[in-house]
Image (cartoon, rainbow, N blue to C red):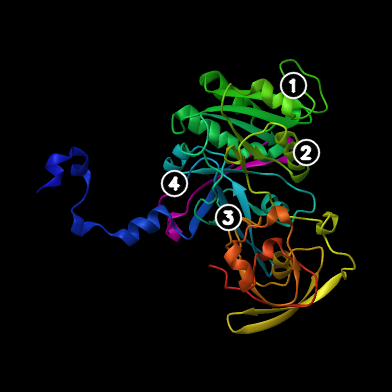
């Protein structure tokens, strides 16, 4: 039986003997994407828009497709340090087909990666990135038809992509953006989001200002009462993305709403700092410990500050450790703790139960509580 005669959609498929599954898989989900900066634009608050296109000379001819809400893990070589940083994609999924990703990056004072990028990236700079990663995406079988985004500061980035996908018809939901900033002048993508709101009835932007009273804006913080004000009758999903302090505040407000947990979605929490501030952090922890690192048949001892993640310690020592999300979620940095004790914040605990008895740790969110011996896998090149 010739199935192409029964199903016209199959007529566009190549003959089976010409299909190359490995090549198709590598095109859709490449381990490495070789990119280059094609355009740079200044943004509010010292931020910059970096447009990245394929670096055909290095072998990347087309950009991998993505879902709104995903991120790229960017590899940086700074002196003897090889490290990665995750950056949400701000462009629409359709624009990847047109040949570019948009990343918006703050210059964080004292920020190793952000200052390096602002100081060195220019048009033509070659950039190494992962495939699009992350699960902060809309899923119709799980999420409600209305998504209310609770956003703080520059964390609006993935929601620009989300809003564009809704406007393009690539995501079938209504989107309400409760966007918290200090003032209107500090809002990122304000003109872009207002234009999308005007063009698409399924998008609504609500600016929530903590330090300024402005016409058409809410004043104060994102509270349970404010969420109820803009929520529809019936079910809705909450997508939350913002700095740690904002999340702690919003978590308490969300608890009063009585939503089922499947309707509450959190973006990557970001790198964890200040473990000593946690209520369950043990007492009498020394300032630093000796960590013996085993990697690909070699062994190296480093001094690890107890208030710095093991991943940062490894990077500072010039050890190329694998990493992507830096939040304890993806498991890419998973290593084995051979001896000693570490502290992992509860909010960053992304290990499966089956991994715990086997000594598996995520260095990106593990802090030493004693001298350690750890075994890490080699970083992907």
The disc at residue 73 is: 3
Q: Are marks 1 and 2 in contact (CB under 8 Å)?
A: no
Characterize the local packing of mark 2: few (<14), some (14-19) or many (20 or more) Cα atoms within 10 angstroms.
few
- Please report whichever mark, 1 or 2, sits nearer to the chain's N-terminal start: 1
| Foreground pick, 37 / 195 | 195
Residue indicated by mark 1: 218
Label 4 close to label 2 by CB (< 8 Å)? no
Q: Which of marks 1 and 4 is in front?
A: 1
Labels 3 and 1 touching (C-beta < 8 A): no
- 117 or 25: nearer the eye? 25
- The earlier-in-sequence mark between 1 and 4 is 4
Q: Can residue 271 be seen in this view?
A: no
Where disc 2 sits, the SS reads: helix
Q: Circle 3 — which element?
A: strand
N-terminal of the pair, mark 3 or mark 1, is 3
Badge 4 marks a residue whose secondary structure is: loop
Q: How crowded is mark 1: few (under 14 residues within 10 Å), some or many (20 or more)?
A: some
- Pinpoint residue 117: horizontal percent, then vertical percent: 67, 52
Check the image and name the residue furthest to the top: 215
- Residue 368: x and y, percent? 77, 69
Q: In this view, does 296 lie above or below 241?
A: below
* SS category of the residue bearing label 1: strand
Tell me the distance, in whole angstroms, between the alpha carbons under discs 1 and 4.
36 Å
Label 1 to label 2, Cα distance in Å?
17 Å
Mark-to-mark CA distance, 3 and 1: 35 Å
Q: What stretch is highlighted in magenta?
A: 40-65
Q: Name the residue under label 2.
A: 249
Q: How many residues crowd mark 4 within 10 Å: few (<14), some (14–19), many (20+)?
A: some
Is residue 49 a member of the stretch shown in magenta?
A: yes
Quick check: 111 left or right of 287? Answer: left
Q: Residues within 10 Å of mark 3 (few under 14, many from 20)?
A: many
Q: Is 152 in the magenta?
A: no
């Amino acid at each position: 039986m010739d199935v192409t005669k029964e199903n016209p959609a199959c007529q566009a498929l190549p003959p089976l003997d010409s299909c190359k599954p490995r090549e198709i898989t590598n095109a859709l989900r490449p381990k490495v994407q070789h990119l280059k900066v094609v355009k740079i634009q200044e943004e509010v608050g010292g931020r910059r828009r970096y447009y990245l296109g394929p670096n055909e000379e290095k072998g990347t001819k087309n950009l991998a497709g993505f879902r709104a809400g995903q991120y790229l893990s960017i590899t940086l070589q700074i002196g003897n340090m090889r490290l990665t940083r995750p950056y949400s994609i701000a462009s629409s999924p359709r624009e990847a087909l047109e040949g570019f990703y948009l990343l918006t990056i703050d210059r964080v004072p004292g920020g190793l990666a952000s200052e390096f990028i602002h100081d060195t990236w220019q048009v033509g700079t070659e950039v190494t990135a992962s495939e699009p990663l992350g699960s902060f995406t809309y899923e119709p079988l799980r999420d409600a038809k209305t998504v209310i985004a609770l956003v703080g500061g520059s964390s609006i980035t993935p929601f620009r992509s989300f809003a564009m996908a809704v406007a393009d018809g690539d995501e079938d939901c209504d989107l309400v953006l409760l966007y918290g900033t200090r003032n209107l002048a500090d809002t990122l993508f304000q003109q872009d989001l207002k234009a999308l709101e005007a063009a698409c009835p399924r998008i609504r932007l609500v600016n929530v200002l903590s330090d300024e009273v402005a016409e058409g804006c809410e004043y104060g913080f994102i509270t349970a009462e404010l969420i109820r004000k803009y929520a529809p009758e019936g079910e809705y999903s909450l997508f939350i993305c913002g700095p740690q302090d904002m999340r702690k505040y919003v978590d308490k407000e969300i608890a009063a709403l009585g939503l089922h947990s499947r309707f509450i979605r959190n973006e990557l929490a970001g790198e964890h700092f200040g473990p000593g501030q946690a209520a369950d952090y043990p007492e009498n922890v020394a300032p630093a410990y000796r960590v013996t690192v085993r990697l690909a048949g070699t062994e190296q001892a480093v001094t690890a500050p107890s208030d710095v993640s093991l991943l940062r310690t490894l990077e500072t020592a010039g050890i190329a450790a694998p990493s992507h999300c830096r939040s304890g979620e993806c498991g890419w940095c998973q290593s084995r703790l051979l001896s000693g004790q570490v502290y992992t914040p509860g909010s960053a605990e992304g290990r499966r139960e089956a991994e715990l008895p086997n000594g598996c740790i995520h260095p990106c969110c593990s802090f030493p509580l004693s001298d350690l011996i750890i075994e890490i896998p080699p970083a992907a090149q």
